[in-house]
Amino acid sequence: MEFTSIGELSPNQRPCKLKCRVSRLWVATNINTDIVCHLDMILLDSQGNDIWVQIPPLLMKIFQPLLKDQEVYTFSNFKVQSAPQEYRPIANDNIIICSGKTSVQQIPDVPRSIPTFKFTFMNAAQIKRNLNKIDILSDVVGQVQHVSERKTSCKGGRKTTRRHISLKLIEGDVVSVVVFGRLLPLLESFVNASGTASFVIVITSIRVTPFQGDCSLSSTSSTCLFSNIDIPEVNAFLNGNNENVAPVLLEEPSTPEVPIVTLAELQNLSLDMQNEDNVYSVEGKVVDLHPLWCYLSCPTCVYKAPEDQDTYHCTKCNKTTTIKAAKYRLRLEVVSDDTSPSFVMFENVGENFFGLPANQLFLENGGLKDSPPEIILKILGMTLKFHVKIKISMYTRSKPDFTVVKIDPDSIDDLPATLQKVASTQSIHSDIENSRSSSQISDPLCTAVKDTDGEKTPCTSLKRKQPIE
């Protein structure tokens, strides 16, 4: 059988045989749950055509030992179909799906005619044009100027770790790329291997999103990293007059230590406070939740939108709009040592903890502000370490509300199994590459959750309380 070119492939392709190089190979995982979805690769043929390939998870144990980056193979008995319309790592409209019948055989004598790499690099102008573009992901190449310290945060009940790479493009522009989780050991090995010399890195399958009025570049589950590879774009840096800046791999950041207090001490700190604002760490068990879990605001800021007006003017943004977005405002009752103050959690903390913005939950919950979705009710019974911000003015109230500014990631070890079980059965958390099946959200009024002792904690919070001011 003669070899077919990738460019000749089409959906419902008749049986054919390919001779291609594995240009990239990676395990695709659901970025929200870390569940393995499939084994992916990009194939290149002698004409420079490329195509995306997926191997289902049940077949990974068969194919993964056979495949290596940059090696050449023959492929036959596969299926060609239309590629997903969103988050494609390359521009080809087709994708190959392997099955148990697919045959893969390595070619010992590697043909030099088959290229090793193919990328679609963005310059600064193209990065701006690709803002919020989700059909095809793009690549960047640049000289590493700096690598930040590791930063850990909690999102959706799961710890995520990241580093920021300061990257100088060939035109001289400097951009920042956020690299997550599984890529960090490889990135750190590049830095350690470079010694005192700077190096050039290729980062594939980048997503461009808005952040604080600028473009934010971040890795995806399809991202691969390459250092100082032999391609013209990299050689332009290595052979040019670019600054020889040594990247710095910082240690874990030395953050100011947050004072640890008990709940009882927290309520009696006013006499000892020296500043207007203070942040303290306190541990407690969430035993109650106010049913009014969100409020409607301006979509751009946190200005509360009037509920009785369809069109309103946001004084903070200085604009008139008809759009209203839900924002978190969770009032929690936290107990420890017979003390039970109220903690209030707003949008930033709520989105990081539950893994999605309040507005998405609000829409999935049928637009109900006074009936918390099931995933929010799962916080009941959990013992967490809160960083709370307090002001002297709060103590003028009979029972002050303490604002939560952070939930300590070290206290969330038991959360993933709890929160992700809920998230995986609802269409409330959409992965940027992998769609999920959705199911009916159960009535939160009938929900009970298990606390850490295995006992059921009823949702007593669903009794009506006074509105949050």
Image: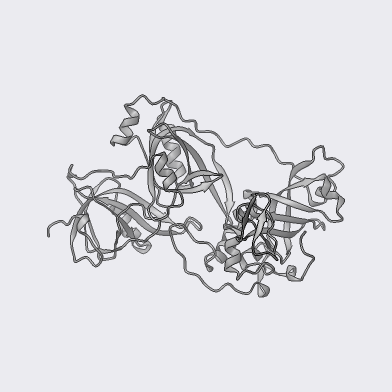
Q: Position of residue 378 (x, y in %)?
A: 64, 64
- Count every numbered label the image shows and give the total: 0
Residue at x-position 42% and y-position 44%: 127
> Quarter of the image holding residue 297?
bottom right
Residue for point 29% across, 45% down: 118
Residue 297 relative to residue 57: left or right: right
Frontmost residue, 270 versus 294: 294
Quick check: can you spot residue 203? no
Answer with the quarter of the image where residue 170 lies. top left
Instruction: Return the x and y of residue 433 as percentages of the image width and height.
Output: 43, 57
In this view of the protein, which residue sits in the foreground, 407 or 321?
321
Residue at x-position 85% and y-position 53%: 397
Q: Quadrant of the N terminus?
A: bottom left
Q: Residue furthest left?
A: 1
Colouring scheme, one of rainbow, by chain, secondary structure, one colour: one colour
Q: Residue at x 54, y 46 (%)?
A: 211
Residue 404: % across, % down? 71, 51
Locate residue 355, reporting x and y percent: 57, 57
Quadrant of the snapshot with the C terminus: bottom right
Can residue 242 be seen here? Answer: yes
Q: With respect to residue 327, does 279 lie above or below?
A: above
| Front residue of this view, candidates 10 and 203 | 10
- Decide: is 192 above or below 280: above
